[in-house]
Image (cartoon, rainbow, N blue to C red):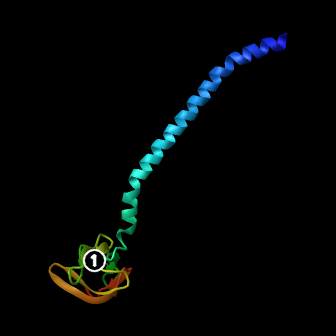
Amino acid sequence: MSDINSDKQNSGKKPGKKLIERWQSWVAIISATIVLFGALLDLPQKISDAFKNISPDDPSCEFYGRIVYSNDQPVVNAEIIVEGEKGSGFTDDNGEFHFTVKEKAGTRVQMLIKKDGLIKNNTLETLPGPVTIQLKDNL
């Protein structure tokens, strides 16, 4: 008789427990569906971004390096120019520069270093870098 009473007590709890388990399952399914839908909406943009840099219509790469004086002090606020309007940028407080060049990696380009209106160095460099140039005297 005690087994019958305990079965009745447990059977009273099971429908509620099953309802909660079903509810949790539905919440998990709905959450997973929302996450999947969000990822699928973002997928075309991610694919486009991934192939942007290898498009033959828009060849470009990052050009970077450092410009220093002969005493290893950084050349600050110098303009770095890749001839032919392919790109330009400025050195920071450490003499470092980083910008996008409209040319493919592996291409040799003419690079100018300009500060206060004077061109101080004219050199041929291979993209993307890193480029380190040590100037013979101050600009």
Q: Residue at x 40, y 60 (%)?
A: 46
| Residue 14 point in image, percent of width and height | 68, 21
- Is 108 situated above or below 61? below
| Residue 72 point in image, percent of width and height | 35, 81
Instruction: Name the secondary structure under disc 1.
Output: loop
Q: Is residue 27 left or right of residue 39?
A: right
Q: Residue at x 44, y 51 (%)?
A: 39
- Residue 117 lies in quadrant: bottom left
- Residue 112 lies in quadrant: bottom left
| Residue 74 point in image, percent of width and height | 31, 76
Considering every residue shown, the one lying at the far left of the view is 117
Considering every residue shown, the one lying at the far top of the view is 1
Query: 10 Å neighbourhood of mark 1: few (<14), some, or many (≥20)?
Result: some
- Is 122 situated above or below 62? below
Residue 138 makes an appearance in the image: no
Residue wearing tag 1: 102
| Residue 113 point in image, percent of width and height | 24, 82
Residue type of the residue flagged with mark 1: Lys
